[in-house]
Image (cartoon, helix red, strand yellow):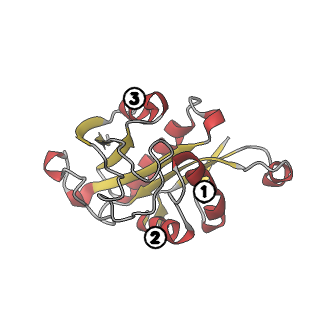
């Protein structure tokens, strides 16, 4: 497996993997372009992908994707703090807090440390950008609560639970189709913070 910075050439595979894992319309080209820009600061890219060590051509020939995981991360000071955030409970100021948007690994390869390696790559990047901590909203209903478990194992601390965080009536992006709930999502987001050394 190779961990490397996300580039625009990777967008289509990232969109396909994200939508297959998180639900229809989770990502599209326009949203990913915006996310991508929000993760670059001081010419440092905080977004990463995990790629199979096999050549992309060999994998494509077998109708498989070469991208097996990705991590999308917003640079500190470059993302909107919304009503689902609790900055009064954060250990650092808003300007020093990055946002861990999404960590996604193909289903057959989960539990092999890929997500943790992607997180560590993003942490190194955002620290180089100047961030002192990162916040994320982890999907509590992920299989076996794996999202919260892996982030806790990395040192993340729970700040607050946000029921129905991704519900269409609560979220400004009303076209998301949850893989568990359909178009009326009631999954809980666990707002968690990870301080950097």
Residue 187, given in percent of the width and then of the height, sits at 36, 42
Q: Is residue 56 above or below residue 118?
A: below
Of the numbered discs in the image, which one, if any, rests on residue 34?
Answer: 2
- Where is the C terminus found, in terms of image quarters? top left
Q: Which residue is depicted at the point 36% across and 58% down?
A: 168
Q: Residue furthest left?
A: 88
Residue 104, given in percent of the width and then of the height, sits at 53, 45
The number of numbered discs placed on residues in the rendered structure image is 3
- Where is the N terminus found, in terms of image quarters? top right
Q: Secondary structure at mark 1?
A: helix
For marks 3 and 1, give the one nearer the viewer.
Answer: 1
Q: Secondary structure at mark 2?
A: helix
**Marks 2,3: beta carbons within 8 A:** no
Q: Residue under circle 1?
A: 14
Q: Is residue 4 left or right of residue 60?
A: left
Q: Is residue 126 above or below residue 145?
A: below
Of the numbered discs in the image, which one, if any, rests on residue 146?
Answer: none
Q: Residues within 10 Å of mark 3 (few under 14, many from 20)?
A: few
Q: Earlier in the sequence, mark 3 or mark 1?
A: 1
Residue 126: name its quadrant: bottom left
Q: Is residue 173 left or right of residue 180?
A: left
Q: Marks 3 and 1, how far apart in space? A: 25 Å
Q: Secondary structure at mark 3?
A: helix
Q: Residue under circle 3?
A: 153
């Amino acid at each position: 497996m190779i961990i490397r910075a996300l580039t625009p050439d990777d967008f289509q595979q990232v969109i396909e993997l994200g939508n297959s894992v998180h639900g229809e319309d989770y990502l599209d080209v326009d949203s990913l372009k915006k996310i991508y820009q929000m993760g670059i600061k001081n010419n440092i890219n905080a977004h990463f992908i995990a790629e199979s060590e096999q050549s992309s051509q060999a994998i494509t020939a077998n109708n498989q994707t070469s991208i097996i995981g990705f991590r999308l991360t917003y640079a500190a000071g470059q993302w909107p703090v919304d009503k689902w955030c609790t900055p009064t409970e954060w250990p650092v100021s808003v300007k020093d807090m990055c946002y861990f948007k999404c960590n996604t690994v193909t289903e057959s390869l989960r539990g092999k440390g890929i997500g943790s390696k992607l997180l560590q790559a993003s942490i190194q990047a955002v620290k180089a950008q100047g961030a002192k901590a990162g916040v994320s909203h982890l999907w509590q209903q992920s299989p076996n609560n794996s999202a919260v478990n892996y982030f806790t194992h990395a040192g993340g601390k729970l700040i607050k639970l946000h029921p129905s965080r991704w519900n269409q009536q609560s979220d400004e992006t009303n076209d998301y189709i949850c893989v568990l709930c359909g178009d009326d999502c009631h999954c809980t987001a666990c707002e968690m913070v990870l301080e950097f050394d």
